[in-house]
Image (tube, rainbow, N blue to C red):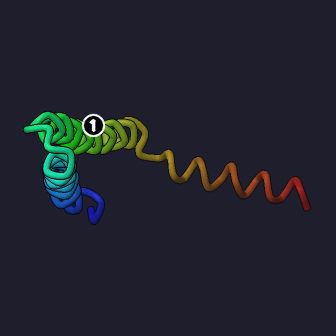
């Protein structure tokens, strides 16, 4: 739940962080708005990539709700075999 609530903040940071980086580079190099637009697109893509990964992870967990229990049992069996 904490990861889901932090997605909005991560999207804003990615978009505005890249936007300000593009503005900074454009001002330093005097290139107009080339880097601003480029980094803005990169920031939006990075933000929505985070959403995609979250939805993909959420969907895989929803398909197999007993996944954590199976993983724990498998780990315990492997530890018992080593001893």
Q: Quadrant of residue 36?
A: top left
Camera-side residue of 41 and 45: 41
Direction bottom: furthest residue? 2
- Tell me the quadrant of the picture where the N terminus can be found: bottom left
**Is 71 left, or right, of 77 in this rendering?**
left
- In the picture as drawn, the residue positioned furthest to the left comes out as 32
Left or right of residue 63: residue 78:
right
Q: Residue at x 80, y 58 (%)?
A: 79
> Which residue sits at x=37%, y=41%?
57
Q: Nearer the viewer, residue 49 or 53?
A: 49
Q: Tell me if residue 3 comes above or below residue 54 in the rendering.
A: below
Residue 18 appears at what percent x and percent y?
21, 49
Q: Percent from the top left, x then y, of residue 73? A: 65, 53
Task: Tell me the quarter of the picture where residue 31 sits.
Answer: top left
Q: Is residue 82 left or right of residue 19?
A: right
Note whether 24 is above or below 26 in the view shown: below
Residue 71 place in picture, x, y as percent: 60, 49
Mark 1, other Cα within 10 Å: few <14 / some 14–19 / many ≥20: few
In depth, the one of 24 and 6 nearer the eye is 24
The image shows residue 3 at horizontal and vertical percentages of 29, 60
Q: Identify the residue at image location x=28%, y=44%.
A: 50
Number of marks present in the image shown: 1
The outermost residue toward the right is 83
Q: Nearer the viewer, residue 6 or 34?
A: 34
Image quarter of the C terminus: bottom right
Please, is residue 11 above or below residue 46 in the view? below
Which residue is drawn at the image coordinates 43% and 39% (left, top)? 64
Q: Secondary structure at mark 1?
A: helix
The residue under label 1 is 52
């Amino acid at each position: 739940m904490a990861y889901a609530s932090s997605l909005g903040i991560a999207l804003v940071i990615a978009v505005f962080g890249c936007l300000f980086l593009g503005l900074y580079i454009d001002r330093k190099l005097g290139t107009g708005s080339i880097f601003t637009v480029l980094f803005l697109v990169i920031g939006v893509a990075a933000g929505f990539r985070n959403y995609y990964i979250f939805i993909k992870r959420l969907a895989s967990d929803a398909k197999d709700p007993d996944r954590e229990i199976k993983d724990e049992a498998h780990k315990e069996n492997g530890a018992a075999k080593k001893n």
